[in-house]
Image: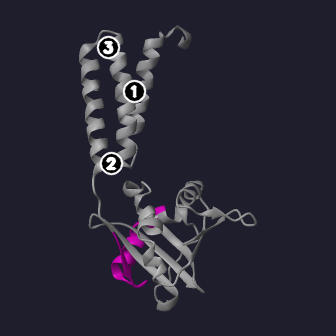
Amino acid sequence: MFLNIPLLEWIGYLASIIVAISLTMSSIKKLRWLNLVGSAVFSFYGFSIGALPVGFLNLFIVLVNIYYLIKMNSAQESFKALVVEPNDAYFNYFIEFHKKEILQIFPHFYLDSTNQDKTSSIALLLLRNAVAAGVFYGTIDNGCLYVQLDFVTSEYRDLKPGEFIYKTNVHQLKEAGIHKVVAKSEHPQHDKYLTKMGFIRRSDTPTVFEKEI
């Protein structure tokens, strides 16, 4: 049965699958990229079978996606890492609200905000265009920052928040007397993230990553 399906029909099925998958993306940028590819394949399929409305409609969707991707990539965004106390009400509410997703990436994370030494920890509320996009928390010992939590919500997970903390705004960590950052990863996606942020995996402890700043 499947062997009798024409190649063009398979292309139509492929386009449908790509478009459907694109709609499951929580990241707007990923959604638009996948939707662009799916629409391009659908446009080709429409023109190939002589269905001009299908071809032109999807060609229009391709152009719309290209327009918004260019706009997103060229937009000047504002980031700010607000230093807060570990017992800050909104900081803790944010963590509690996203607790289920946080524990998927940081399964052993626990913040005891009632028993914190202010001089040995750093808590940041990360704002993106004045909107709370993530939270950052770590403990400091002899100039070394041990990251306990580095989390942004899925819609903002495009590496820009991390680049702001570890690269663009790294002086904020240096001013706190930090010269080295140590992070533990228990999730494959977090491994990739740390590598892209310039961390190096310890050869003796594969789950631990380090970065000199």
- Cβ atoms at labels 2 and 1 below 8 Å apart: no
The residue under label 2 is: 73
Q: Relative to 166, does residue 15 appear above or below in the rendering?
A: above
Closer to the eye: label 3 or 2: 2
- Residue 161 inside the magenta-drawn segment: no
Total label count? 3
Q: Relative to 65, does residue 6 appear above or below in the rendering?
A: above
> What separation in Å lies between label 3 and label 1 (alpha carbons)?
15 Å
The residue under label 1 is: 16
Which percent across, then down, holds residue 14? 45, 24
The local crowd at label 2, few if under 14, some if 14 to 19, many if 20 or more residues have their Cα within 10 Å, is few
- Residue 88 inside the magenta-drawn segment: yes
Using the rendered view, name the quadrant where residue 41 is placed. top left
What quarter of the picture does the C terminus occupy?
bottom right
- The residues colored magenta run 80-101
Q: Which residue is drawn at 46% across and 66% down?
A: 167
- Looking at the image, residue 138 sits to the left or right of residue 8; the answer is right
Which percent across, then down, holds residue 31? 37, 42
